[in-house]
């Protein structure tokens, strides 16, 4: 019986993996410019972290976590997202005590959610995310969105849209929540069982229900914007002003709701408008989470961040026909002619590699013609041809495959010759 890959996961093979490396490098490069430092947290955490951090009533915690007991009978969970782990680490490592604030962090790594797999939705996916903790300045909200947009733009995406909303502060949210309950309660039996449960636990999430999207009560549901107190309104205006200053365009969507419980004030998603992108159009999402660090036992600390999956980014690149400038070029293919040359090849190849040249040779006892073919197939810049005669004189022939130019150089100068021309 064959054993196949688990549902909702994928192998990333050579040829494709170079694109991932390119994107990861781009993310690191942009984070360097925006001054975010990398953090690496464990793949699994105590289950309570997500129950408390992401929220007991969210789909993630209720339906999507990979939770298991370890041999010491602890309940552990493969991380479904990166914000709660980073906040945990922030508290545990007392980063709130660092002189330099806010603490600006990024991560790239696999996340796990037991979701129904489809294009753009996987059970294991890689998130690139950032978190800025310790600042309540609206300009950092704009900075986080700017970083996300920069990533897409520098990779060559054109059909992207920043959708922005505010969820207000605790007081505003409470008033909105009560209005939502009053709005839906009289006719809640007409909604799905999830929404019926959400009415008391998390009525905001009703607005995000896929099943009841068409219900007439949805269209005229109370908007958070009618319940924002002065402070929340002012904060939202300041975030928009910062975005305007950066020349970043956005649309405000008062119905934008996020699937995680920790958000307040700024919430945003970046969507793809590209034709043929498929049913899932959200490329990334994020927002402000001013209560999270405190909920996890730290001092009251404001925070904001976002995350995107590389899988959805790659789908968007494909939908827009963007080719990433990835190459897997070989500097030198070593062709041998004769038994003596063949027996010396391993040492010569190793010397080239140590000298900084990417080099390859034949391992299948191929004839010379087939070795040349392999050099072509691997896109080699140079072919170094070693015959028994050359070897006797400590010489080697180097042919530049792009120009056809051919020279004979002393063996110990071969690496330098090629380096000068690469
Ligand atoms: P999220 O909206 O749950 O937010 O996920 C963020 C992004 O992760 C999505 O926009 C999407 O690109 C990707 N993603 C989520 N689930 C899947 C999946 N099953 N397959 C492929 N990609 C997926 C968060 O995770 C928050 N921690 C973001 C954040 C950071 N908020 C503040 N800081």
Image (tube, rainbow, N blue to C red):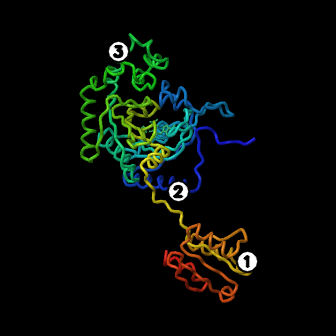
> As drawn, which residue projects farthest toward the top?
186
Do the CB atoms of the residues marked 1 and 3 lie less than 8 Å apart? no
Task: Name the residue at 45% across, 12% down.
Answer: 189
Residue 385 on image: x %, y %: 63, 80
Instruction: Tell me: residue 96, above or below residue 344.
Output: above
Mark 1 nearby-residue class (10 Å; few <14, some 14–19, many ≥20)? few
Determine which residue is flagged by label 2: 18
Q: Which of 130 and 16 is in front in this view?
A: 16
Dot 1 falls on a residue whose secondary structure is helix
Mark 2: few, some, or many residues within 10 Å (few <14, many ≥20)?
Answer: some
- Dot placed on the residue nearer the N-terminal end, 3 or 2: 2
Q: In this view, does 422 lie to the left or right of 340?
A: left
For label 3, count other residues whose C-alpha is less than 10 Å away and answer few (under 14), some (14-19) or many (20+).
some
Mark 2 residue element: helix
Residue 128 position (above or below residue 237)? below
Q: Do the residues labelled 3 and 2 touch (CB within 8 Å)?
A: no
Front-most of residues 274 and 259: 274
Q: Disc 3 on helix, strand or loop?
A: helix
Task: Choose top left, top right, bottom left or bottom right for residue 300.
Answer: top left
Picture quarter with the N terminus: top right
Residue 343: image tag: 1
Residue 71, image x and y in percent? Answer: 69, 34
- Identify the mark nearer the N-term, 1 or 3: 3
Q: Name the residue under label 3.
A: 183
On whether ligand 1 comes within 8 Å of the CB at mark 2, the answer is no
């Amino acid at each position: 019986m064959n054993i196949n890959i688990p549902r909702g996961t994928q192998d990333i093979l050579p040829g494709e993996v170079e694109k991932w490396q390119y994107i990861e490098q781009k993310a690191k490069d942009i984070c360097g410019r925006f001054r975010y430092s990398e953090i690496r947290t464990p793949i699994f955490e105590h289950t309570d972290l997500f129950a408390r951090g992401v929220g007991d009533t969210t789909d993630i915690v209720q339906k999507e976590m990979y939770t298991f007991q370890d041999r010491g009978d602890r309940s552990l969970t493969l991380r479904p997202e990166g914000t709660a782990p980073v906040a945990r680490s922030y508290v545990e490592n007392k980063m709130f005590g660092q002189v330099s604030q806010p603490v600006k962090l990024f991560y790239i790594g696999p996340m796990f959610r037991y979701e129904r797999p489809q294009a753009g939705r996987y059970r294991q996916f890689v998130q690139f995310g950032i978190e800025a903790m310790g600042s309540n300045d609206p300009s950092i909200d704009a900075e986080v969105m700017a970083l996300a947009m920069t990533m897409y733009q520098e990779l060559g995406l054109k059909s992207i849209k920043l959708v922005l909303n505010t969820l207000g502060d605790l007081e505003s949210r409470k008033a909105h929540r009560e209005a939502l309950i009053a709005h839906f309660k009289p006719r809640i039996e007409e909604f799905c069982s999830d929404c019926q449960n959400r009415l008391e636990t998390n009525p905001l999430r009703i607005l995000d229900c896929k099943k009841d999207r068409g219900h007439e009560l949805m269209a005229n549901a109370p908007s958070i914007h009618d319940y924002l107190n002065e402070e929340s309104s002012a904060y939202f205006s300041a975030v928009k002003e910062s975005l305007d200053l950066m020349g970043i365009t956005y649309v405000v969507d008062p119905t934008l709701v996020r699937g995680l419980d920790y958000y307040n004030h700024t919430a945003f998603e970046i969507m793809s408008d590209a034709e043929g992108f498929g049913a899932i159009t959200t490329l990334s999402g994020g927002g402000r989470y001013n209560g999270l660090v405190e909920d996890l036992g730290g001092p009251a600390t404001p925070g904001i961040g976002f995350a995107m999956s590389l899988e959805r980014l790659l789908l968007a690149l494909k939908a827009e026909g963007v080719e990433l400038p990835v190459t897997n070029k070989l500097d030198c293919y070593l062709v041998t002619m004769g038994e003596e040359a063949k027996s010396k090849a391993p040492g010569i190849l190793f010397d080239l590699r140590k000298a900084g040249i990417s080099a390859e040779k034949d391992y299948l006892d191929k004839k010379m013609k087939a070795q040349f073919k392999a050099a072509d197939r691997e896109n080699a810049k140079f072919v170094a041809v070693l015959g028994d005669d050359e070897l006797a004189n400590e010489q080697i022939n180097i042919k530049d495959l792009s120009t056809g130019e051919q020279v004979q150089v002393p063996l110990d100068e071969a690496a330098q010759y090629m380096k000068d021309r690469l």
